[in-house]
Amino acid sequence: MVLKPPPRGGAAGAAAAAEQQLVAYLPWPLRDWEASHEHTEQRTKQHTLTADGDAVALAIVLPGEPSIEDRAIGDLTLILTSAAHAQVAVGWVLHPDFQGQGYAREAAAALLDLAAGLGAHRIAATVDAANEPSLALCERLGMRKEATFHQDRHDQTGWRDTVIYALTAAEWLGRRVPAADTTTTAGAH
Ligand SMILES: CC(C)(COP(=O)(O)OP(=O)(O)OC[C@H]1O[C@@H](n2cnc3c(N)ncnc32)[C@H](O)[C@@H]1OP(=O)(O)O)[C@@H](O)C(=O)NCCC(=O)NCCS
């Protein structure tokens, strides 16, 4: 697996297609393909994390996988939430065809490595309380459940709860979860 800036075209298109099926727990509206593609393109334009709110998107790519060539199977987001306090937030989206195989965990582990390498002090994830796969991913990464906000958001389905997971970079580097799960032989990636 490789993480890289999503190239214009194929990777952005793949991520955009995935978006349409994956927005249930994301703070994104359901977009048609064109709007979704444009949104992905916009997200890939940022290459630096300098000011609060800056966000960098990285494509998750499986090199040498002939059936999907070099298209993205999902993407990651790294957001600088506070430069002064070295705070970052992470996010992840995986195309449904590639879920349940450990790819998100592998990619997220690399993202936490990147965040730590860039000098982040604390890494947080904001997750809808009903988003079981994302909550499970946070747990697998060893992130700490720090807060649950009860009915802090409202959408077309009603009031929603939000869970905050986090860990410090030192904690991550100290008890880093191996990207490849050596306890299982499934999906040798
Ligand atoms: C959140 C999301 C990225 C999680 O993806 P995922 O594929 O479930 O996560 P993982 O990579 O950790 O995979 C874990 C599953 O793969 C299985 N697996 C299979 N082979 C594996 C391997 N070699 N290594 C690790 N896990 C493996 C695990 O057993 C686990 O299965 P389970 O869910 O039945 O317990 C995905 O559900 C998603 O894109 N959701 C929509 C977008 C979204 O909501 N994003 C989050 C916003 S906060």
Image: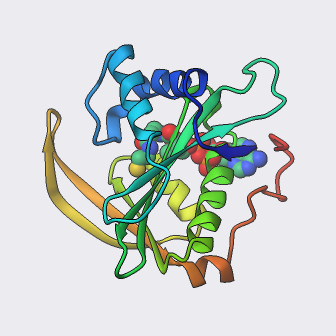
Q: Position of residue 58 (x, y in %)?
A: 56, 45
Q: Please identify the quadrant where the N terminus is shown.
A: top right
Front-lying residue, 50 or 133: 50
Q: Position of residue 152 (x, y in %)?
A: 15, 57
Q: Quadrant of ligand 1?
A: top right
Query: Which image quarter: residue 23?
Result: top left
Q: Position of residue 72 (x, y in %)?
A: 62, 31
Front-lying residue, 163 or 171: 171
What residue is rendered at 69% in x and 40% in y?
A: 101
Q: How is the image coloured?
A: rainbow
| Residue 185, above or below 108 | above
Q: Is residue 38 left or right of residue 148?
A: right
What residue is rendered at 64% in x and 60% in y?
A: 109
What residue is rendered at 49% in x and 26% in y?
A: 18
Front-lying residue, 173 or 3: 3
Q: Is residue 80 left or right of residue 172?
A: left
| Residue 35, above or below 26 | above
Query: Which image quarter: residue 42?
Result: top left
Q: Please identify the quadrant where the C terminus is shown.
A: top right
The tally of labels here is 0
| Residue 31, above or below 63 | above
| Residue 36, above or below 84 | above
Q: Is residue 140 left or right of residue 88?
A: right
Q: Position of residue 142 (x, y in %)?
A: 58, 70
Q: Is residue 64 left or right of residue 177?
A: right
